[in-house]
Image (cartoon, helix red, strand yellow):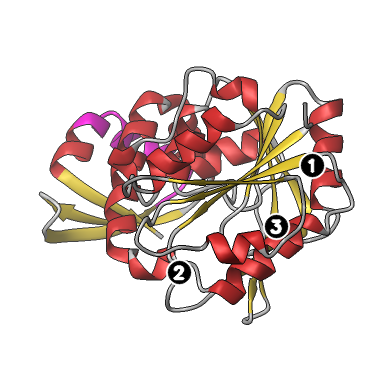
Amino acid sequence: MPKISVLMPVYKTPPHYLKDAINSILNQSFSDFELLILDDCPEDDREEVIKSFQDKRIKYFKNDKNLGIASSRNKLVELAKGEYLAVMDHDDLTIQKRFTEQVKVLDSHPEIGVVGCWIERFPLKKVAKYPEHNKEIEEYLMQGCGIPHTGAMIRKTVLKNVRYEKEFSPSEDYALWCRLLGKTEFYNIQKVLMKYRSYEGNTSKRQADKMIIATKKIQAFVRGKHLDIWQNVCDNAPHMVRMKLFGLIPCGKFVQKGSKRKGILRYLPFITTKMKLEIK
């Protein structure tokens, strides 16, 4: 039984990017893992690329028809035999010590179910930093994805009753973290352990508009379900708020600080259905 199951969905991945991604996994300093690769594009075979690697830890699967990213991720979760699940996108690179660092956190902190890290966007060489501790991450989740998905490691037991949801694709990762709020704790290692490949073909660029719409839907449900966390965010961080009546007509903007924000929160159910708040 491997300690880690690495979950890599594949869809029309440029062959050289896929090779680089696989190599970065096989070169990990922590070696007790299985690498599950699931091809979700039946008409575009990547089996030749994968079979070029002579490593018994690689297990290749192919969908008979296109299932989409959320369903493919769920299938990989079901196939996984490891205690921990390491998320790996098909075109990114993982730093050699990533698994060693993340396993150390999960082994020593049973209350933590998800551990992330900082991400370097390449070839831009820009580092995306994420908050470290659970409280900060929970508050971050009210406004955005507080754990980078590529580069996350998940304790498999915390997914017992939670899965990726097609409704929120291509932001199914953000929705998953929000569903886990209150069910486990989060932690981000304050080091760059992943490299995110930025290019025109990756999902975040191809589906940017869908991602914005899905993110707003997720924010609506997580703020309503965890109003205490959302209120704390609003009470303790100054924001410029733009208000649009019915999500269309600009009707003003203002800065709220401290306890003055509480007035708007009394009407949160009305606001979330009748107005769109854009928080900068």
Query: Mark 2 or mark 3, which has the lower sequence index?
Result: 3
Please tell me which residue is depicted at 62% across the width and 60% down the height of the picture: 50
Q: CA distance from mark 1 to mark 3?
A: 12 Å
Query: Mark 1 or mark 2, which has the lower sequence index?
Result: 1
* Above-or-below relation of 88 to 18: above
Within-10-Å neighbours for mark 1: few <14, some 14–19, many 20+:
many
Q: CA distance from mark 1 to mark 2?
A: 25 Å
Q: Which residue is mark 2?
A: 202
Q: Residue 20 placed where, x, y %?
A: 68, 70
Please tell me which residue is depicted at 39% across the width and 70% down the height of the picture: 205
* Quarter of the image that includes the N terminus: top right
Viewer-nearest residue: 221 or 203: 203
Residue 94, can we see it? Answer: no
Q: Residue 222 placed where, x, y %?
A: 39, 33
Q: CA distance from mark 2 to mark 3?
A: 19 Å
* Above-or-below relation of 143 to 211: above
**Quarter of the image holding residue 267?**
top left
Q: Which residue is mark 1?
A: 102
The reply to whether the magenta stretch includes residue 11 is no
Within-10-Å neighbours for mark 2: few <14, some 14–19, many 20+:
some
Q: Residue 26 placed where, x, y %?
A: 78, 56
Looking at the rendered structure, the kind of residue marked 3 is Trp
Q: Which residue is mark 3?
A: 118
The residue range painted magenta reads: 256-269
